[in-house]
Amino acid sequence: MAGLSAEQRNDYYLREATRTGIHKPILAALFVAQARPSLRDGEVGLGISPANRIPLEQVNTFAEQVQYAANTIRSITERLATQGWKGDELWDADQGRYADRFIEMLANGYVPPASDPAAARLEPTSDSKLLQAYLEDWTLDCKTAGLPPSFAFLDPALLRFTSEIPRYYLGISYQRQALLEAIRIWRQFNTRQSTLAALLERDESDPTLASLDATRLDQPLLQFLQQIPANYGGYPHQRESLLRLVQLWYQCSSREAAIARLESAPTAETSISMIDPGLMAWIQRIGQSYQGKGDQRNALTETYRLWYGLESRSAALQELGLDSQVLAASNPNRNALITVATQLDRALVDFIKRIPMLYQETDAQREALIRLVQMWQGLEGREQTLQVLLDEVQRLEGARRDSIDAMPKPDPLPLPPRPTYWTPNNLQMHAAIVENGCLTWAEATQAGIHLPTTQATVDAIVRIADLAQQAYDRLGRPFHIITWYRPMEAMTGRATSPHRHAIGDAIAFYCDGLTGDQIYRTLDPWWTGGLGRYRNYPYLCYLDARGDRVRWTQA
């Protein structure tokens, strides 16, 4: 049985480090330095042995070794703090890592007291080997995230960030989760349930905690958070608590990404982009409920003007393709007025339906949509409108998918007219390459990742699509494309004929319910180009549109 990959091990380290509020590289270092015991899943451990009420069976897999190693490190730091160790004795703030003295303490091993049922025995190991492995893993994390050489800025930035939270807290669910997770780590709890029980002064087994109204948490969460700056002692778990807060608040991909964000913008100010889901929900509902009323028409026309930065309503009407003089005439012809209004309604509905695709999240576009909501609802000002949109976001977060409060399903836009012939400048991702065919430009270009830049490549893709459609019809099964057009600079590994994919006239694919051999044998009698199959990949098949009849089977 194959062992775990380095990425899989790292994922275990990250999960347990996040749970316990320890620095992840120390777990990776223990694996390197200890490399024992041998485990029943074929892995080696982190030097964790049974202790007290923890039997051998409970620490005999890699996942269990990491879990109890994290518990044990947390136990050690807590015990040292109780014995009088200060935060700067456990942690080197300038280097952003555990202090050398603490690493030496871990290398000496640890036998947990009987009063600590979650910690196991940590075997002694070489302090130099442990420190080297720790520094190597931490250096790699820093390099990957582009972190600075000094972390002296970090603690002041964390405390400033934390102090700003009450000012910017809006009660959005991910913000609430960030606060709750930070307090969990600060209080050194393992679960959300334990944290809720402590915050609300209830028993952990209280069944009502599971169905608690989340808004009831806001006051105790903010009250606890306000006490943190005064109680911050620089202990590792406290720092990890605040880093977790930043990570979840900004929705960063990692702890290190949160540090990088703090270095560049150490503020808890929330981005106005958080209202975007609410805006999109409003826009889609407006598109579905437009009735052509005068105030609705005026609101959408003003939105169009703001969206495109036009100077006047007349300019907006002109851009919409209408004769503004008909609408402005003192005694307009009624039939002409009805015709123009109908044209305007059609143009405005088309515009509003296209917004979800056109929206690039620019300030001008966002402000145009905020103004639309304000006018549509008859709200007093921008601040009231923003609150309405935030309320909408909160409803979207908790809405069932079949609820009227859920985000409306996006409407597909009609494709533009099919061009007479395809060029690198007019490709339509969802369009069939061959008229009335089944293979699309999205399949040929990996959803636009590899777009052809020359007419020769486009023609090659069209050529193989035409031939492959015939194969498609003979097989009676849809093609699932694995590789089609892939330029040489995007090639990885080694393929049988990589240049054909770079030309654009080769397809590697499979069909549901058919083996590669079945596909190969069905196409073999009449396919005039290249046809291949793979013994190591029994459902995969390959074809290309070269001029010669070529057959191959890859061992």
Image (cartoon, helix red, strand yellow):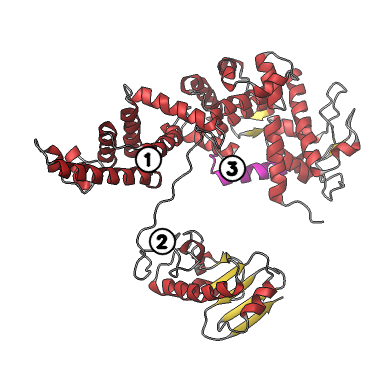
Q: Position of residue 154 (x, y in %)?
A: 55, 30
Distance in Å between CA atoms under marks 3 and 2: 42 Å
Q: Which residues are magenta?
A: 133-150
In front: mark 3 or mark 2? 2
- Residue at 61% x, 34% y: name it: 96
Task: Provide the secondary structure element on which disc 1 rests.
Answer: helix
Q: Earlier in the sequence, mark 3 or mark 2?
A: 3
Looking at the rendered structure, the kind of residue marked 2 is: Gln
The residue carrying pointer 1 sits among few (fewer than 14), some (14 to 19) or many (20 or more) residues within 10 Å by Cα, namely: some
Q: Residues within 10 Å of mark 2 (few under 14, many from 20)?
A: some
Q: Quadrant of the C terminus?
A: bottom right
Quarter of the N terminus within the rendering:
bottom right
What is the total number of numbered labels drawn onto the structure image?
3
Mark pair 1, 2: CA separation: 25 Å
- Relative placement, left or right, of 275 versus 417 is right
Q: Position of residue 258 (x, y in %)?
A: 55, 35
The reply to whether discs 3 and 1 touch (Cβ–Cβ < 8 Å) is no
Can residue 261 be seen? yes
The residue that label 2 is drawn on is: 428
User: As rendered, which of 437 and 172 lies closer to the eye?
Assistant: 437
Residue 470 drawn above or below residue 94:
below
Q: Name which residue type carries label 3.
A: Cys
The residue positioned 39% from the left and 54% from the top of the image is: 414
Q: Amino acid at mark 1?
A: Gly
Tell whether 50 sits left or right of 289.
right
**How far across and how far down the image is residue 333, in percent?**
12, 41
Q: Is residue 451 magenta?
A: no
From mark 3 to mark 1, how far is it between C-alphas?
48 Å
Q: Label 1, on which residue?
A: 287
| Image mark for residue 142 | 3
Which element carries disc 3, helix, strand or loop?
helix
The disc, 1 or 2, on the residue closer to the chain's N-terminal end is 1
